[in-house]
Image: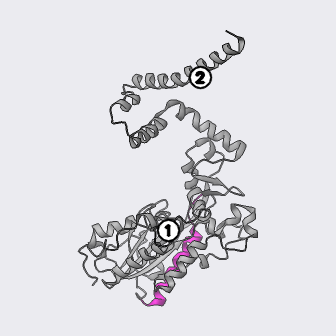
């Protein structure tokens, strides 16, 4: 056997040993823990493409080598390349962005008109929901919340500050079409239009390490929504008196948590976030929802932050209630405001009993979810919903 052949055989055998040693080590670790080897599951189920993908995912998550080595490899990639993984993008000045939110702005919409995957179908879903509520005497106010990238594109790329065109033409087109269709919309893109160039953290509308708005941006949105509701005359100003209680919390942004690499997280410091809790003026109790309120707020994690999360009663719902002078009812579902909250309404029609107004908030990137997962236009009409009182 020639010298070249010996090297080839050696490299081939070494490669095979490395491959099988990982699997063998994983089996021994699982047996030492008293567990059935995950590899045995491969032979206990039907060999189908879907099953193989599930098995591959489970193996990847359970692998001891993956758990021990992947964080350090991701940390090395972050140090050398500023690569933050599959869910995050490193911006300028220490800002972090949620990758799906950036992709919403950079990827083309997937289909031609009428295909079920275009902007017109998204418009139809929203108008249909408005019409179904109107049949029961309930008004609808839609609040699309801008992605952080739409408001601070210059924090993602220095070239964005020189771009005079809007970075989110799809969303602005949908808002324009909704308004022409008679759907009432709170246009937060106009409300936040002066965000560029603001450098002081207390004046920023979004958190640098987070996908969500800052307390300042949230309060500005709540004021805009309350002003629109009162101007439309859908409800009158209530008589409940609320006060504000300042409170400061420390938190790591959710984008850092999504990266799931402690070594990267430790490269950042937690942010001090100055919130204001809403309390009842008469006894100092924290704001609480009232299920029998005539106003129902539907939304996603933009409604959860500060409200259900720390410090509590300091989010959009509480501040909107203060601006209106009356308590609200709410349904909050992380990442499901575009569809799941409406499905919950169809399953529990009593939630709309006595309601006069539904406020529907969803983050801009979830507009595409309306294309793929919109309930049938008959979802509400086939439910036995009581008319509003």
Q: Quadrant of residue 213?
A: bottom right
In the image, the segment drawn in magenta is 209-233
Residue 323 location, x and y as percent? 48, 80
Horizontally, is 234 left or right of 149 in the view? left
Residue 289 location, x and y as percent? 37, 71
2 or 1: mark nearer the eye: 2
Image quarter hosting the C terminus: bottom left
- SS assignment at label 2: helix
Residue 315 in sight from this viewpoint: no
How far separated are the C-alphas under marks 2 and 1?
Answer: 47 Å
Question: Residue at (62%, 75%) from the top-left corner?
Answer: 192
Quick check: 262 above or below 17? below
Question: Residue at (72%, 74%) from the top-left corner?
Answer: 164
Residue 196 location, x and y as percent? 70, 71
Horizontally, is 102 left or right of 309 in the view? right
Is 23 in the magenta?
A: no
Q: Quadrant of residue 45?
A: top left
Quick check: 70 above or below 280? above
Nearer the observer, 15 or 363: 15
Q: Disc number at residue 367?
A: 1
Q: Residue furthest front?
A: 1
Q: How is the image coloured?
A: one colour
Question: Residue at (69%, 62%) from the top-left corner?
Answer: 155
Question: Residue at (46%, 38%) from the top-left corner?
Answer: 56
Report which residue position mark 2 lands on. 15
Magenta-drawn stretch, dominant element (helix, strand or loop): helix
Crowding around mark 1 (Cα neighbors within 10 Å: few <14, some 14 to 19, many 20+) is many
Nearer the observer, 19 or 224: 19
Residue 77 location, x and y as percent? 67, 41
Crowding around mark 2 (Cα neighbors within 10 Å: few <14, some 14 to 19, many 20+) is few
Badge 2 vs badge 1, beta-carbon distance below 8 Å: no
């Amino acid at each position: 056997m020639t010298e070249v052949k010996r090297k080839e055989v050696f490299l081939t055998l070494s490669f095979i040993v490395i491959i099988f040693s990982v699997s063998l080590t994983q089996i021994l670790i699982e047996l030492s823990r008293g567990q059935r080897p995950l590899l045995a599951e491969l032979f206990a189920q039907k060999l189908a493409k879907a099953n193989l993908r599930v098995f591959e995912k489970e193996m990847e998550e359970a692998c001891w080598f993956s758990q021990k080595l992947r964080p350090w490899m991701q940390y090395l990639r972050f140090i050398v390349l500023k690569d933050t993984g599959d869910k995050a993008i490193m911006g300028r000045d220490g800002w972090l962005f949620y990758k799906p939110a950036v992709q919403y702005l950079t990827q083309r919409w997937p289909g031609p008109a009428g295909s079920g995957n275009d902007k017109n179908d998204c418009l139809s879903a929203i108008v249909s929901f408005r019409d179904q509520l109107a049949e029961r005497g309930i008004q609808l106010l839609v609040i699309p919340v801008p992605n952080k990238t739409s408001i601070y594109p210059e924090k993602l790329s220095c070239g964005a500050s020189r771009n005079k065109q809007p970075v989110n033409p799809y969303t602005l087109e949908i808002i324009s079409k909704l308004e022409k269709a008679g759907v009432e919309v709170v246009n937060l893109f106009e409300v936040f239009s002066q965000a560029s160039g603001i450098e002081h953290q207390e004046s920023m509308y979004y958190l640098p390490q987070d996908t969500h708005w800052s307390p300042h941006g949230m309060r500005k949105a709540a004021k805009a929504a309350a002003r629109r509701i009162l101007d439309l005359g859908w409800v009158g100003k209530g008589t409940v008196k609320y006060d504000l209680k300042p409170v400061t919390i420390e938190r790591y942004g959710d984008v850092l948590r999504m990266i799931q690499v402690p070594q990267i997280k430790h490269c950042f410091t937690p942010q001090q976030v100055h919130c204001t809790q809403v309390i009842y003026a008469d006894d100092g109790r924290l704001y609480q929802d009232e299920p029998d309120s005539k106003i129902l707020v539907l939304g996603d994690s933009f409604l959860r932050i500060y409200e259900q999360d720390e410090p509590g009663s300091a989010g959009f719902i509480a501040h909107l209630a203060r601006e209106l002078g009356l308590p609200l009812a709410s349904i909050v579902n992380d990442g499901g405001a575009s569809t799941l909250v409406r499905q919950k309404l169809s399953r529990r029609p009593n939630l709309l009993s006595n309601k006069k107004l539904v406020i529907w908030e969803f983050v801009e990137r979830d507009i595409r979810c309306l294309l793929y997962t919109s309930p049938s236009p008959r979802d509400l009409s086939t439910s036995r919903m009581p008319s509003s009182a």
